[in-house]
Amino acid sequence: MNHPLVLFDGVCNLCNGAVQFLIKHDKKEKLTFASLQSESGQKVLSEFGFPTDQLNSFIYVSNQRAYEKSDAALAICRELGGIFTLCTVFYIIPRKLRDKLYSWVSRNRYKWFGKQEQCVLPTPELRKRFLK
């Protein structure tokens, strides 16, 4: 894997919004994406020892290391650079607390933001950044 990879819940409206945000702000097009439900997503989950049937966490893979939950979000902010590196100040909050908040949002994401019946397909110009 040459580019950092973001795995996301492909039917979650919040997750899809986050991916759209990342695409917009990843000016150097460093990030690639795959849904957790996709063949590629399932393969990466298995490779890093994550359960393939629990699709409730954002996963970020960079330099052969996988990050999940709040660590994934903060590592992505670092990768984006610029103003987003300011978010890394949240590392001062213990991971246990950050992940508790992350898990609370994750548990409620469908109720608050809704979900799609199937994964949203990327536009033709963005397909090169998505794994199948």
Image (cartoon, helix red, strand yellow):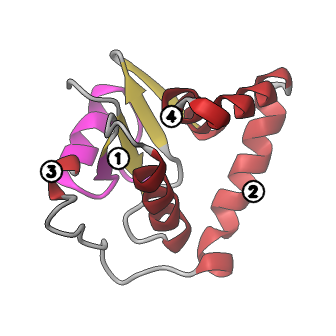
Q: Is residue 71 visible?
A: no
- Residue underneath mark 4: 80
Say which amino acid is labelled 1. Answer: Thr
Q: Earlier in the sequence, mark 4 or mark 1?
A: 1
x, y percent for residue 46: 29, 34
The nearer-to-camera label among 3 and 2 is 3
Dot 3: what SS? helix
How far apart marks 1 and 2 lie (CA) works out to 20 Å
- Residue underneath mark 3: 128
Which residue corresponds to the image point at 28% horizontal and 50% vertical from the top-left? 34
Specify start and end residues of the magenta stretch as a single range: 33-54
The disc at residue 104 is 2
- Residue underneath mark 1: 52
Magenta residue check for 30: no
Say which amino acid is labelled 3. Answer: Lys
x, y percent for residue 109: 63, 69
